[in-house]
Image (cartoon, grey):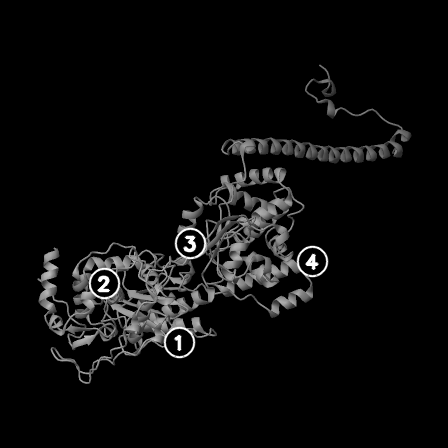
């Protein structure tokens, strides 16, 4: 048997190695050196391979990102209208309503203001928006990647949305084409549309579109509308501080609206100025000047000019048709008078409205030839745009009586003609005087000044309700008038505008007028589309009759129901009115310069607390007329100075006897004689029988009047 070394179970590793000589046992440096270099080369190769692999996978990722981007863009594009068919939506037209002095009173249209070219704006105005909204506007292609990254990091750091990454182009795309919702889909659509806008339009065009369409709060779209709304000036003339405030509003127009949150808007404006300074857009000197002159925001007020603007738009639609382009309307409205009218109404309602349980008022003021200078249709346009001066129709009460008395005067009576003031009963109606006091025989002048109801009813029955209605229509009342006995007390409803217009012939000497507010309508490029025809003088009342009426209506202010009217130095006349149950209170008064009517009441026709035309309406009239006449030369009423004075008012009411000390003055016939023949078609002829009644006929007038009334039914 073999030995252990030969055995098959002994491993080869256990067998002894063959002997080596000494030379072989020495190290070989050269080989070891080559081994170290080899290992180094092997490590460097692995690192190079890793870098190449990184570049490779980055390239693959980039390709896939591009593919994904194209896919997303295609997917988004499928939800958008065809790009080639997209067009910038036409800017809705704006109608600018200008006052008598050329200042903007109001604007109508969805945008609230007209569009301006960049060249019309001060340089710092667009720069303010670029500085705070999109500093790299001129370098990006619609999407600012750096801005988006900065916004993402800021939002992550604050764990909320503190910054937006939208460029001006993206904001414009959103305003023009997209819905105001915050979703990923909308952001993707916004980005695609921004790229399209940048390809199709220049930077200048994009910026101009943006500034004319962005929203600034308070219904103002575009810098022009915003400047007019907050500063009452054009965007052409805003200061650096004002431009910064406007630019700051874009972030959150509702929250930063300066009329509600001035401090917040001003803090944001300081950030805009700092951004402009950092971008090198303004100098230190300009910044200091802006700090010294902060923007002054105009208070909204009640917006009374909007009542007039609504009426203007109705007229514009009538004279030029549907508005499709920007228009400029020159009106007869005086901004100073409009402001004075608004202030008078708001102040009086605030001071005494609760006391008399009255919530609304209206005022119309016009020149004697019908040019409307001020129109206020309610207490606050923002709360209620219903126009109580033009649209509402209410019972004028005794303010209608001048038409009754003019009818009598034109048929032969004079201010000194005598009629009985005593109770009268007509079937189920018993008209009474305000205080249920009766003075017996009184002159027409006294009866009108004291607003005696029974005398007005007697005159209406004497000459016929139809004749009274025709007189009112001839002077300018356009509403339907019921020809019955109660017409004497103003029971048929009329608007304030038409009532004031019907008083104008008394102030201009008897000439017909048509109340008007629009003088000219022109396009934005200056083309005249409408111009009011020159005023044509058409006489509807004879001068002698005008003189008598003015003499009688002066008595209303001197000794009658409007004696609280205060207009020192100016001859004035007018008439108060109060409807049944104190629902409406009126006063229409005039000078040779201005005719002004005031109405007070409630929209639901609920009664007031005994409000009459002689208190709050007269108070507002006085507060308005004083500044309206300031600095104007005094003008007398037509014909009033040529007439003899009428008798003083009765001092003691009596049911059947003349007042104590009563002595009617009887002027010479020539004193009241009209200066020219009465045109038979336009003016009723005088009735000799009425002028020459005997005392016996006068004493029995009641029975005659009743017989005449019922015989006509």
Q: Position of residue 262 (x, y in %)?
A: 50, 64
How far apart are the two marked residues, 4 and 3, measured between alpha carbons? 46 Å
Q: Sequence-wise, which precedes: disc 1 or disc 3?
A: 3
Residue designated by label 2: 490
Residue 26 occupies quadrant: top right
Q: Residues within 10 Å of mark 4 (few under 14, many from 20)?
A: few
How far apart are the two marked residues, 1 and 3, measured between alpha carbons? 31 Å
Image position of 358 (left or right of 53):
left
**Mark 4 residue element:** loop
- Residue lying farthest to the top in this orientation: 1
Q: Sequence-wise, which precedes: disc 1 or disc 2?
A: 2
**Mark 2 residue element:** loop
Residue, x 36% and y 57% (percent of image)? Answer: 385
Work out whether residue 169 or residue 549 is closer to the camera in this orientation and state it: 549
Residue designated by label 4: 280
Q: Sequence-wise, which precedes: disc 2 or disc 4?
A: 4
Q: Mark 2 or mark 4, which is nearer to you?
A: 2
How far apart are the two marked residues, 1 and 2, measured between alpha carbons? 28 Å
Residue designated by label 3: 312
Q: Position of residue 378 (x, y in %)?
A: 35, 62
Residue designated by label 1: 570
How far apart are the two marked residues, 1 and 4, measured between alpha carbons? 61 Å
């Amino acid at each position: 048997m073999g030995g252990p070394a030969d055995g098959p179970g002994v491993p080869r590793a256990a067998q002894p190695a063959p002997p080596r000589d000494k030379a072989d046992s020495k190290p070989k440096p050269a080989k070891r050196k080559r081994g170290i270099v080899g290992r180094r080369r092997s490590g460097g190769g692995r690192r190079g391979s890793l870098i190449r692999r990184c570049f490779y996978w980055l390239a693959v990722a980039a390709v896939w990102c591009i593919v994904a981007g194209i896919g997303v863009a295609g997917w988004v594009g499928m939800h958008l209208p065809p790009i080639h068919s997209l067009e910038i939506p036409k800017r809705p037209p704006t109608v600018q309503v200008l006052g008598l002095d050329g200042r903007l009173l109001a604007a109508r249209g969805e945008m609230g203001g007209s569009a301006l070219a960049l060249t019309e704006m001060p340089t710092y105005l667009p720069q303010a928006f670029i500085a705070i909204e999109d500093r790299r506007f001129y370098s990006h292609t619609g999407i600012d990647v750096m801005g988006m990254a900065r916004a993402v990091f800021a939002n992550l750091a604050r764990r909320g949305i503190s910054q937006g990454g939208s460029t001006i182009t993206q904001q414009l795309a959103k305003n023009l084409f997209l819905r105001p919702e915050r979703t990923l889909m909308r952001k993707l659509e916004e980005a695609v549309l921004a790229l399209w806008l940048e390809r199709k339009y220049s930077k200048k065009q994009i910026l101009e579109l943006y500034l004319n369409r962005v929203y600034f709060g308070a219904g103002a779209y575009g810098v022009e509308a915003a400047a007019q709304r907050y500063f009452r000036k054009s965007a052409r003339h805003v200061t650096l501080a004002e431009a910064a405030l406007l630019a700051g509003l874009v972030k959150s127009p509702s929250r930063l609206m300066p009329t509600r949150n001035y401090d917040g808007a001003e803090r944001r404006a300081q950030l805009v100025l700092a951004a402009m300074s950092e971008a090198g857009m303004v100098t230190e000197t300009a910044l200091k000047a802006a700090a010294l002159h902060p923007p002054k925001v105009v208070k909204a007020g009640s917006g009374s000019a909007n009542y007039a603007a609504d009426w203007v738009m109705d007229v514009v639609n009538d004279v030029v048709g549907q508005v499709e382009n920007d228009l400029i309307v020159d009106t007869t409205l005086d901004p100073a008078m409009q402001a004075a009218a608004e202030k008078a109404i708001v102040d009086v309602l605030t001071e005494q409205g609760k006391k008399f349980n009255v919530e609304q008022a209206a005022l119309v003021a016009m020149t004697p030839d019908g040019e409307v200078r001020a129109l206020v249709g309610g207490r606050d346009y923002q709360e209620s745009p219903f126009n109580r001066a033009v649209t509402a129709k209410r019972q004028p009460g005794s303010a209608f009586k001048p038409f009754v008395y003019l009818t009598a005067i034109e048929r032969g009576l004079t201010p000194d003609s005598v009629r009985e003031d005593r109770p009268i009963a007509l079937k189920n109606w018993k008209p009474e005087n305000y205080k249920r006091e009766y003075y017996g025989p009184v002159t027409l002048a006294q009866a009108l000044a004291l607003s005696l109801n029974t005398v007005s009813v007697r005159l209406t029955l004497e000459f016929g309700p139809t004749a009274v209605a025709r007189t009112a229509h001839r002077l300018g009342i356009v509403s339907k008038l019921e020809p019955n006995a109660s017409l004497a007390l103003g029971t048929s409803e009329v608007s304030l505008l038409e009532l004031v217009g019907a008083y104008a012939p008394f102030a201009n000497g008897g000439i017909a007028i048509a109340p008007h507010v629009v003088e000219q309508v022109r396009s934005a490029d200056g083309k005249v589309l409408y111009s009011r025809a020159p005023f044509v003088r058409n006489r509807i009342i004879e001068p002698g009759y005008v003189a008598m009426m003015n003499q009688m209506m002066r008595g209303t202010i001197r000794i009658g129901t409007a004696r609280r009217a205060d207009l020192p130095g100016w001859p004035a006349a007018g008439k108060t009115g109060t409807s049944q149950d104190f629902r409406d209170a009126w006063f229409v008064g005039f000078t040779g310069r201005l005719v002004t009517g005031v109405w007070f009441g409630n929209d639901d026709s609920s009664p007031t607390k005994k409000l009459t035309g002689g208190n709050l309406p007269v108070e507002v009239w006085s507060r308005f007329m004083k500044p309206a006449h300031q600095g104007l030369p005094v003008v007398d009423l037509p014909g009033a100075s040529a007439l003899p004075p009428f008798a003083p008012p009765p001092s003691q009411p009596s049911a059947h006897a003349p007042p104590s000390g009563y002595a009617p003055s009887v002027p010479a016939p020539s004193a009241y004689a009209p200066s020219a023949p009465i045109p038979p078609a336009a003016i009723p002829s005088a009735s000799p029988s009425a002028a020459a009644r005997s005392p016996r006929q006068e004493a029995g007038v009641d029975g005659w009047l009743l017989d005449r009334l019922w015989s006509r039914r």
